């Protein structure tokens, strides 16, 4: 390749012209946004100018472009050289099993997840954040069934999360149900909502399904906001009971004779115990989800999900009932979202429609896609990135979400297939039958 | 079969006998693939009926069934003109997906499968054996764990036939299986199809443009033009039929040839 | 009766704005098959530019309403087009040829970015400008109900109609339109025939942004109140409109916009304002159940 297309190194003048062009675009974009701003002065707006800031921005873009271009060229150069070297070597057979590194990473993460609360038992913030990560991991694994495996674009996943959360909130506050009793009911209810939405709409083509699911998510949210008698409206539902440890509540010892967790185990009471318990609870739920989804994937239904993602018409020609298979993916995904919702409600103790807006759906979808469609481990990595990024960004306060959006674009551009692209076959040929090439 | 004002297939009737290879030929646009789509339930014919004499279930009216039921209940399987494999799944997975219905029944709404019950494990083992035996027969073993989408075209065609065979067909509809094959592959395909119809007792419906294939292996040929049957019969008869020659060569050439 | 006509007027006004934004969705979907979630935020950005522009003009002492409107339209359209171009260039072009979902996620990221960018640079507070076009015509009064047609409403509908005419001409008669349609049908073939596909796609984004900018100016004129969050709601409505009309179909987008505007106006007036969005989405679901390709979408024969 190198002999045929010698790479033309850009001359300095070309580089400057390129960066100059970018600076010009930056100037055009910057004038109305950075250069000018309207400020409320009494009863009317007045325009303020911020020329120095604008100049800094344009200069930054100019220099940034120069640096970016330069490093990209270097990178491309090295890549070509590497490819040329590889081409000279004999053709290699692709490794059949997954990269050992990736396999190890999964176990390593699991180990870290298990010991985390013990290492940070005094640091409530760390355990809390880790709990949030795990909620997203579970949601990601649930949505992965729908989007990653079955290839159905669901933009309203948060609706099922809300159904689960509100189901638990209502069952516990109105009827005094416990966490474990509510879990299957809420999961079932969410699955039912999944069926109710999926039944009429799963015949639709991919992107039509996207807007319908988005609309469904909005419908659920609007109903939650407005049906005050049921959901408490915008104020939500408060004082939702927390889950107990096999009937032992996490609370300070009191005189009314209620046996508490701390009392039963002869421990000193501390509010951190509940935080750690909740952490292990969601870890358990998430791991069960993972086990469930991984097993399903190796079953006929799971393989049919992936087959439908690959080619629906071929599935029909092979006698697969596409509608029921899609429905099963949709309902199971919804159920897992509902279960995560139950945990969310139990952990927060308070829920309101604020927690179930479209941007949540978008975040969960981003986790699945950034992780690498269908990859279970990818979901974990993407959740870590997407939850921790804004947390780290707290120091930047108002720039936090700005950087978050930018990071989403950059990761996507950097790895369009997601962080982990590799797909593990759901069934392997038995070893002795593998032919040796 | 009509699409709006266009009548794609009109007054067509023919029979495809058991254990025989029936070829459907005709110029491009004659309605061959449309015919397949009618048989396999992807299109619903506007009039007429398609009857399959199923060895177990008796006679089935295919035009009343949805496409997935045609494959599942009537066991009519097909391949596509532009292969439709599951590209990211391995060759073996393609073969296993074809056995979905049997496996799904064994997995009892996935419960038996989730808990790895014995009866599901047995069914899965059987399915795997079935898949491996077809892979072996089609010389595809070495590709078993490779994503189907990266294989060369000719190999993909074989995978598609193998996948259809895994679903245990009574009637196999092949849409231009020899397209894009080199002469050697094409000869191998001939042997395979003959073997299938003679030994496995499957009826084969074949759409093919390659006359070498058609004339060598067909028991019976149906010729379509503009959606109508213009000739039918054994290969030698059809080859000489004046209507067929006319349809293929055009009016003028036909006159010239006669002269 | 009188109130029905009033709602009709309000609905058509609102629908025109949705329709203008919807065209951006439908064009982008038609040409690269992606849902551009950032499109609603482009519209929001344009509304901010329009507010700045109106304020500047007021400070400069330009009091002629038509002149001010023309200047603001021109300036906003110009700047917003550059935004549309940049968004495509940075967030979507590098992803061309990858999976269907990659640009979708990237566009969600872009949407978050634009919202927060405006929040940071322009402030999170609601901005309001004094009404620019005041007054209207009282059409008639019946049963004590006064049917009022505001001048701003007339302008909105007139601008929309004029733009639609220009736009239809652009797509059906010009060489750009032909290239655009060619890329829509088969991008690879278009490229082989010497059409600069990248340029065509860039232009499509710019035109979509320009139409959104017109909508942004009109909204500023109509309501006079904007904030950094208006892009989300309008974006979802416009996207719904595009799908309702049949995504990929330009008249469909306009029709979808009008239908949604009317549903909202009537539902809010007669049934309940809170549930008007529920009505919109429910009707969308119903329509798609019976017409899976939308109102004006070409029925797609399942190609086997």
Image (spheres, coloured by chain):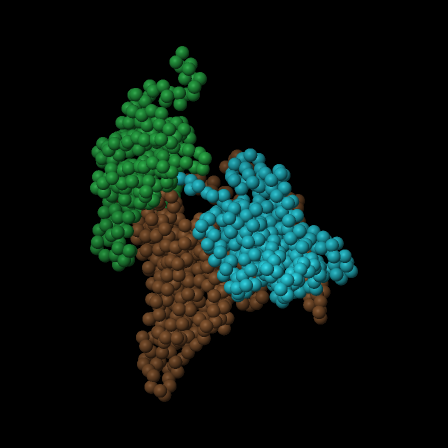
Quick one: quadrant of the C terminus of chain B? Answer: top left
Would you identify the image quadrant in which residue A43 lies?
A: bottom right
Q: Is residue C297 above or below residue A217?
A: above
Q: x, y percentage for residue B179?
A: 37, 31
Indicate the colour of chain C.
Answer: cyan
Q: Write the residue at 58% across / 66% down.
A: A398
Residue at image position (21%, 33%) is B199
Say left or right for C79 vs B29.
right
How far across and how far down the image is residue B113, in percent? Answer: 27, 55
Vertical side of B52 occupied by C132: above or below: below
Q: Nearer the viewer, residue A188 or C251?
A: C251
Apparent side of residue C267 relative to residue A41 in the rendered image (left or right) = left
- Give residue A61's position: percent from left, percent from top: 63, 54
Please report the residue visible at 28 percent of the width from the left and 37 percent of the height from the top: B51
Where residue B155 sits in the image (x, y, percent)? 35, 36
Q: Which corner quadrant holds the N terminus of chain B? A: top left
- C201 or A250, which lies in front? C201
Q: Is residue A104 visible?
A: no
Q: Image check: A330 left or right of C180?
A: left
Chain A's colour is brown
Taking the view exactly as shown, the residue that stands out farthest to the front is C143
Q: Is residue C8 above or below residue B101?
A: below
**Residue furthest out toward the right:** C61
Chain identifier of the green chain: B
Q: Residue furthest top?
A: B259
Q: How many marks?
A: 0
- Can the viewer see residue B2? yes
Q: Residue at x 31, y 25 (%)?
A: B232
């Amino acid at each position: 390749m190198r002999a045929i297309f010698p790479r033309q190194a850009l001359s300095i003048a070309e580089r400057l012209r390129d960066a100059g062009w970018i600076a010009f675009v930056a100037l055009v974009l910057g004038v109305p946004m950075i250069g000018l701003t309207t400020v409320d002065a009494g009863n009317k707006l007045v325009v303020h100018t911020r020329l120095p800031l604008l100049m800094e921005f344009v200069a930054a873009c100019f220099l940034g472009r120069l640096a970016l271009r330069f490093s990209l060229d270097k990178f491309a150069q090295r890549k070509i050289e590497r490819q040329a070297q590889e081409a000279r070597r004999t053709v290699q057979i692709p490794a059949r099993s997954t990269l050992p590194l990736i396999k190890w990473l999964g176990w390593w993460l699991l180990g870290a997840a298990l010991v985390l609360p013990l290492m940070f038992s005094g640091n409530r913030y760390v355990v809390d954040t880790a709990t949030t990560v795990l909620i997203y991991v579970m949601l990601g694994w649930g949505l992965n069934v729908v989007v990653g495996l079955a290839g159905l674009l669901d933009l309203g996943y948060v609706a099922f999360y809300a159904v689960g959360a509100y189901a638990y909130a209502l069952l516990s506050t109105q009827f005094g149900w416990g966490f474990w009793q509510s879990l299957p009911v809420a999961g079932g209810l969410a699955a039912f909502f999944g069926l109710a939405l999926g039944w009429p709409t799963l015949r639709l083509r991919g992107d039509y399904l996207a807007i319908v699911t988005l609309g469904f998510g909005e419908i659920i949210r609007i109903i939650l906001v407005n049906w005050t008698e049921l959901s408490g409206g915008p104020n939500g539902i408060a004082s939702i009971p927390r889950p107990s440890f096999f009937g032992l509540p996490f609370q300070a010892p009191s005189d009314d004779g209620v046996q508490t967790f701390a009392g039963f185990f002869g421990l000193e009471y501390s509010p951190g115990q509940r935080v750690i318990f909740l952490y292990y609870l969601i870890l358990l739920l998430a791991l069960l989800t993972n086990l469930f989804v991984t097993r399903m994937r190796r079953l006929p239904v799971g393989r049919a999900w992936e087959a439908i993602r690959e080619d629906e018409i071929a599935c029909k020609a092979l006698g697969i009932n596409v509608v029921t298979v899609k429905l099963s993916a949709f309902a199971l995904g919804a159920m897992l979202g509902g279960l995560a919702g139950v945990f969310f409600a139990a952990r927060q103790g308070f829920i309101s429609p604020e927690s179930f807006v479209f941007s949540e759906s978008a975040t969960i979808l981003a986790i699945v896609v950034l992780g690498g469609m269908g990859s279970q481990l990818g979901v974990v990595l993407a959740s870590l990135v997407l939850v921790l990024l804004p947390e780290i960004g707290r120091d930047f306060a108002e720039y936090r979400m700005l950087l978050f959006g930018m990071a989403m674009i950059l990761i996507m551009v950097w790895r369009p297939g997601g962080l982990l692209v590799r797909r593990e076959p759901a069934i392997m040929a038995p070893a002795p039958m593998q032919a040796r090439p | 079969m009509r699409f709006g004002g266009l009548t794609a297939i009109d007054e067509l009737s023919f029979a495809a006998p058991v254990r025989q290879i029936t070829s459907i030929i005709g110029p491009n646009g004659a309605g061959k693939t449309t015919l397949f789509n009618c048989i396999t339930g992807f299109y619903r014919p506007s009039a007429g009926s398609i009857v399959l004499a199923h060895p177990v279930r008796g006679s089935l009216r295919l035009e009343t069934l949805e496409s997935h039921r045609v494959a599942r209940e009537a066991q009519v399987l097909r391949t596509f003109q532009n292969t439709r494999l599951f590209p990211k799944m391995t060759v073996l997975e393609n073969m296993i997906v074809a056995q979905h219905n049997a496996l799904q029944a064994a997995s009892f709404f996935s419960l038996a499968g989730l808990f790895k019950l014995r009866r599901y494990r047995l069914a899965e083992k059987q399915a795997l054996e079935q898949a491996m035996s077809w892979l072996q027969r089609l010389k595809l073993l070495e590709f078993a764990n490779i994503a189907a989408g990266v294989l060369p075209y000719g190999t993909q065609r074989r995978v598609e036939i193998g996948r259809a065979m895994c679903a245990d067909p009574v009637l196999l509809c092949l849409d231009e299986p020899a397209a894009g094959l080199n002469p050697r592959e094409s000869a191998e395909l001939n042997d395979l199809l003959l073997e299938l119809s003679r030994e496995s007792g499957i009826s084969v419906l074949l759409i093919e443009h390659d006359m070498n294939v058609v004339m060598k292996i067909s028991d019976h040929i149906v010729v379509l033009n503009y959606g109508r049957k213009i000739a039918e019969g054994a290969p030698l008869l059809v080859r000489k039929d004046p209507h067929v020659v006319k349809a293929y060569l055009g009016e003028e050439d036909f006159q010239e040839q006669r002269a | 009766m009188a109130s029905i006509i009033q709602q009709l007027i309000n609905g058509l006004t609102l629908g025109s704005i949705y329709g203008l934004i919807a065209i951006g969705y439908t064009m982008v979907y038609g040409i690269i098959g992606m849902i551009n979630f950032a499109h609603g935020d482009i519209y929001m950005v344009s509304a901010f530019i329009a507010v700045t522009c109106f304020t500047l003009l007021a400070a400069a002492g330009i009091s002629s309403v038509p002149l001010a409107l023309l200047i603001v339209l021109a300036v906003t359209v110009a700047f917003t087009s550059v935004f549309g171009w940049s968004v495509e260039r940075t967030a979507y072009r590098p992803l061309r040829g990858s999976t269907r979902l990659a640009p979708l996620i990237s566009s969600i990221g872009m949407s978050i970015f634009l919202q927060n960018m405006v929040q940071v640079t322009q402030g999170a507070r609601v901005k309001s400008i004094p009404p620019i076009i005041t007054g209207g015509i009282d059409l008639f009064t019946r049963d004590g109900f006064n049917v009022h047609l505001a001048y701003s409403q007339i302008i909105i509908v007139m601008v929309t109609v004029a733009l639609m005419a220009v736009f239809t001409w652009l797509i059906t008669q010009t060489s750009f339109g032909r290239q655009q349609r060619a890329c829509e049908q088969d991008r690879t073939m278009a490229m082989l025939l010497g059409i600069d596909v990248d340029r065509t796609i860039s232009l499509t984004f710019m035109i979509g942004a320009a139409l959104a900018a017109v909508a942004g100016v009109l909204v500023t004129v109509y309501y006079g109140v904007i904030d950094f969050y208006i892009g989300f709601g309008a974006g979802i409505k416009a996207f719904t409109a595009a799908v309702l009309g049949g995504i990929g179909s330009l008249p469909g987008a306009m029709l979808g916009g009008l239908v949604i505007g009317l549903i909202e106006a009537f539902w809010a007036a007669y049934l309940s304002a809170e549930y008007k969005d529920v009505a919109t989405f429910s009707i969308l679901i119903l329509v798609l159940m019976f017409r899976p390709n939308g109102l004006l979408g070409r029925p797609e024969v399942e190609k086997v």
